[in-house]
Image (tube, rainbow, N blue to C red):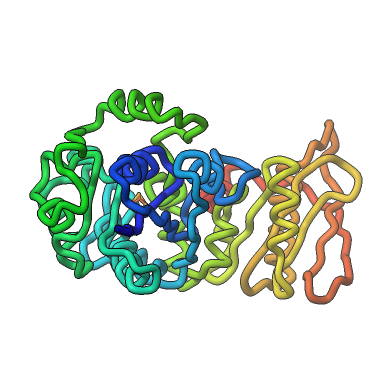
Amino acid sequence: MKAIALVSGGLDSVLAARVAQEQGIEVIPFHFSIPFCHRSKSDSGPGAGMNRLVRSSLHIPPVIKDISADFLSLVREPAHGFGSQMNPCIDCKILMLRKAKDEMPVVGAAFVITGEVLGQRPMSQYRDALKLIEKKSGLEGLVVRPLSAQLLDETIPEQKGWIARSALLNFNGRNRKPQFALAKRYNISGYPNPAGGCLLTDPAFSNRLKDLIMHGELSVENISLLKIGRHFRISDNARLAVGRNEEENRKLLSLAKGGDYLFMPSSVAGPTSLGRGVFSKDLAMRCAAITCRYCDLDGSLTAEIIWRRVAYGQEEIISIAPFAETDLAGLRI
Ligand code: SF4
C-alpha cells in the first residue's frame, strides 16, 4: 500500500512518515515548496537541509514541487484568516493536501500522511481545524496523522486495515519530548529547531510582507528580496534593501534585475543596497545617503557611493553625507 507523506523539513513530518513505513506502508515523501520557508531544501546552505533529513530518515528522496504561485493568493486574502502574524495556516494546509490529492493517482497512493500533532499549534492543529482542513481538501477520512492518530477519529486506512491503529501514536500538545524520544529510537538526528520554519510567523517579516501587499508589489521575486537585509520604503512605488553583511551583499547582487538600482561605497567598507521600483534622481540620492549611513566612515563626514541602474551598467559616483538617523526610522519597514 502506497501513501504520500507531506514533509516540511521539520522533525514531526519525517517521524510520522517513518511510523507509517514501520507499518509496511510504501511512503512517498512530497515537499510542497513555498517562498516563506527558512529551511534549506538542498543538502548545503542554512538550515538542516530538508533533502538530507528526509533521505537519511526515510531512505528515499523527497519529491519537491514548487507551489509558490498558488500560495501567493493565500497571503493576500486567506479564506480562513491569519494566525498571529501573516500565517494563513488553515488555508496553507488545505492547499498542501489538495496538491497531495492531485498527486495521489499519479503515484498510486491510497492516502496521505501528515506530521500534525493534536493541540501543538494554536491555529491549525486543534480537532475542529484538523477536520475542517481535511474536509476542504476533499480528503475526508484519507489523512492519517500517525503522531496523534489514537486521539483522532478512525480513518479509512485504519478501518480497512491498511495501517494498524494500535501501532499509531497519541502525542498531544506542545511538549516535544515524545518526538525527541521517537527520533532517538529511529536514530534520526540533525533535524532543525522546531520553531521558525516559516517566515510568515515572524512579526518583522510579516510587517514587510504587509507593506508589499499594501503597495501592490506581491510577487515571488519581491518575497526573495524581503528575506535579505534592512528594508526601507522610499516612496509609494520604490523600496531599498541594504545588506547587513558580506553574504547579504552578495545575495542582493545576485537578485538584482535589469530595472533595479545598485548602490555601494567606492573606497570605504559598507553595504550593497538594492533599490527596486520607480526612481527619480532625488530618490537615488536618498538611497545613496542611506547606503552611506551604514558605511564605515571612520570619522569622515561623507562617503563616495557608486550607483547604477542594473540594465544600463553605466556607473555614477557621488560624495554624500549619511541619511539622518531620525528620518531613517520613519522609512524602515
Ligand atoms: S506556519 Fe507557514 S508553512 Fe506552516 S502551516 Fe502556517 S503558513 Fe503554512
Residue at position x 30%, y 69% from top? 101
Give residue 258's position: percent from left, percent from top: 74, 74
State whether residue 100 appears in this view.
yes
In the shown orientation, is residue 111 left or right of residue 68?
A: left
Occupied quadrant, residue 138: bottom left
- When the figure is inspected, residue 119 is found, relative to residue 291, above or below; the finding is above
Can you name the residue that lies furthest to the right here? Answer: 267
User: As rendered, which of 15 and 219 lies closer to the eye?
Assistant: 15
Residue at position x 15%, y 43% from top? 165
In the shown orientation, is residue 79 left or right of residue 325?
A: left
Give residue 202's position: percent from left, percent from top: 41, 44
State whether residue 124 appears in this view.
no
Give residue 26's position: percent from left, percent from top: 36, 53
- When the figure is inspected, residue 258 is found, relative to residue 323, above or below; the finding is below
Image quadrant where one finds the N terminus: bottom left
User: As rendered, which of 175 and 312 lies closer to the eye?
Assistant: 175
User: As rendered, which of 266 and 70 lies closer to the eye?
Assistant: 70
Residue at position x 26%, y 27% from top? 175
Give residue 73's position: percent from left, percent from top: 37, 71
In the shown orientation, is residue 19 left or right of residue 318?
A: left
Occupied quadrant, residue 104: bottom left
